[in-house]
Amino acid sequence: MSPQASGLSLQPDWGVWLTAARPRTLAASVAPVVVGTAIAASIDSFRPSAALLALFGSLSIQIGTNLANDYSDFKRGADADRVGPQRVTQSGLVKPSTVKNAALAAFGLAMVFGLTLAVLSGWPIVVIGIASIAAGWLYTGGPWPLGYHGLGDLFVFIFFGLVATCGTVYAEALEVPAQAWIAGAAMGALSTAILVVNNLRDRATDARVGKNTLAVKIGARATRVEYVVLLTLAFGLALALKGRPWPLVALPLALQPLRRVLRSDGAALNPALGETARLQLVFAALLAVELWR
């Protein structure tokens, strides 16, 4: 029985909020900033203050998106038969209104970081920030949630790949060289791969409540192919940038999550989320070292 069902009123502690933030997914907001900063440094435009503001803003947007997703999925009944990690709203650990307010607070914090960054780097940062926050809320919220209509993969590729990487480069260098778009696409591919694991795992329960993710629309076999294509695309694009094997050092980290995705289903896919996130972080670090040289 959940705390809500039993009539208990619990004050969420930091452990609960850490669960709500979904730390295993936060690689998707850190990795593109690391790579974008390396690109800026490669053209002699590294600005530590801008890089930190971009990092904190990116993390705030993702945490806000995760909290908004927790709240919206609960309101739509999408977490009723959950097989993934615990959601704090559905489990009754935190009241829905509190989770909603926390999401808005995270987005508000992102706006503070974004406006501060805009003072350093100009008005385009405001446009990027507003678009990212709006997309984060509309991912599972609003009258036509993107994630419920098979557009979640595209959303993640654009905002946690191209926008986050190129936006970081612009914030530091005030320009976006061609290599930023290529690197952004590589980051977007790996960020999307994390989502693919999540949606592959949840496709049966999502389908029952009308959450028509791309995995629901195309089925398990095609979703597994999508995961393979995304990993291949990321490594291929990284090699295209410099033509050197540094990013390939991360390739062994792809083997375990790949085996899980190809062979497992349901809750057995949970470890592949963290493994794919770890792959993205190591891949980003290696790519950043290569680009910075």
Image (cartoon, grey):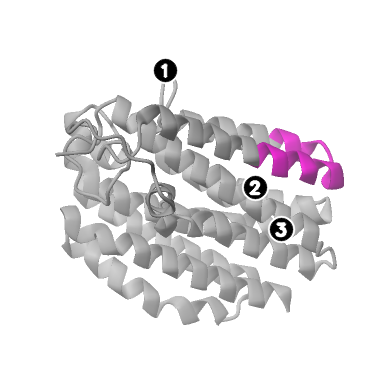
- At 29% from the left and 55% from the top, the residue drawn is 225
Residues shaded magenta: 110-127
Residue 139 appears left or right of 164: left
C-alpha distance separating marks 1 and 2: 26 Å
- At 47% from the left and 65% from the top, the residue drawn is 280
Packing grade of label 1 (10 A; few <14, some 14-19, many >=20) is few
Q: Which residue is mark 1?
A: 143
Please, is residue 176 above or below residue 41 in the view? above
Q: Which residue is mark 3?
A: 52
Hey, what amino acid is under mark 3?
Leu
Q: Which residue is mark 2?
A: 57
Percent x, y for residue 131?
A: 62, 33
* Extreme residue in the top direction: 143
C-alpha distance separating marks 3 and 1: 34 Å
Count of numbered circles on the image:
3
| Sequence-earlier tag: 1 or 2 | 2
- Say if residue 205 shows up in the picture: yes
